Amino acid sequence: MMENAAELRKKYPYTRPSVICHGPIIGLGYRPPWRLGNICQARFALKHGLKVMLAQQSAREIERTGRTFQDVIDSASVSASEAQLEIPWGADGDHLRNEAEVGAAARAGCTHFTYDVTADLKAGFDAVVEKVLKLNHLAHQIKCGLKFTTEISLDEGESTTAIDEITRLLSVLKEKHVIIDEIAPRFPGYFEKAIDYYRDIKDKKRICDTSDFEKYLKQLADAANANQFRVCIHSGSDKFSIYPIVSKILQKNFHLKTAGTYYLEDLKILARHDTALFLEIFAHSSAQFARDRASYELSANPDEIPDIKKLEGAEIARLLQSGQGNDNLRQVLHVTYGSILTARDETGKPLFGGRIEKVLRDNFVEYQQELFSHLGRHFKYFF
């Protein structure tokens, strides 16, 4: 695929990632290597004229899937070609934590760099500034004068990001001749994987109150306008309750990242058309969940998943429906994607990947309809 993608980029400019300078920007990364979902995303972006990061993957996701930034960008190039996506699209090297990761993303051709300073927050303000300076300097060295956009990821901090700390950080970096395009703060409330936003948990129930989020977002929007940065929202998949608020308050000045749950749409098709294979994947995911959940903030309780072995495929697919199914099932499957995509049998052959891809190819018309519906629910407020 690599040579094919490289040839495409030589012949057709629209298959090369571009620098996206103005919002709204939609992150549309796709984790599996078979790129069928990436092609659907490209077709959806073309249909609605969306500015997208068609290639978006975090360094942590790269580790878990066994892919590379180059592979992710090549997949997006091929997908753009398949969809004839002749509007600019970007490539986001997401959650880059060190120089090795920035180097890999830059050499692959990323046009947006997300500097993750989570590990430096506890060390204090100066450590954060030093990390951003170091990573940004390296990106400029490798890009050799080519333009790119930048972002600082603060979203995995332990508490809501103080807005005056954001403005202070940007001011100090500006004094050192570093301009940051986007800030991803830690918002009040919880942005867990694969489920909607919620404010708190009381008596083991999620409190779905968006008032604190809205108040904070208004203050953040004022700071963004005054300091000329774009607001970036991470873990944005399936956060249906906040999309109208984001649209109303931020207008176009935002970047929404939604890479995670497209894999669950794949599994929905699988449940309908090869229930036995789905049950194999669920068993493997359940066995890996305790390990794989360690780096995620989750409230999932596997004990609250129904006995799916007793259900028909269509019933399981309904449990996977975003916002309407079983959140515990969705989260267990969501965070174990890496274990499924990299599982091998005793001969070294992929245990699940090839079989999943075949089911999706055999039912591609239905799959694309399902994915278009999922994408539409996410972005109808932003068209």
Image (cartoon, rainbow, N blue to C red):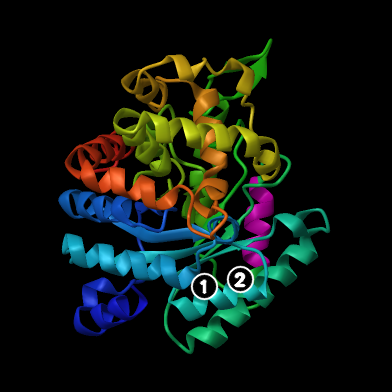
Viewer can see residue 106: yes
State which region is magenta. 163-172
Query: Does 208 appear in magenta?
Result: no
Q: Which mark is residue 105?
A: 1
Near mark 1 (Cα within 10 A), the count class, few <14, some 14-19 or many ≥20, is: many
Q: Quadrant of residue 193?
A: top right
Which x, y percent locates residue 91?
Answer: 40, 66
Total residue callouts: 2
Helix, strand or loop for disc 1: helix
Residue ID at (35%, 65%):
75
Image quadrant containing the C terminus: top left
Rendered position, 38 above or below 203: below
Residue ID at (30%, 48%):
358
Image quadrant containing the N terminus: bottom left
For this orientation, the residue located farthest to the front is 347
Viewer can see residue 192: no
Q: For mark 2, what is the residue?
A: 101
Verify CB contact (< 8 Å) between mark 2 and mark 1: yes
Q: Which mark is residue 73?
A: none
For this orientation, the residue located farthest to the bottom is 144
Residue ID at (57%, 47%):
339
The residue nearer to you, when weighing 332 against 288, is 288
Classify residue 205 as left or right of residue 20.
Answer: right
Which x, y percent locates residue 381?
Answer: 29, 36
Identify which amino acid the numbered label 1 is placed on.
Answer: Ala
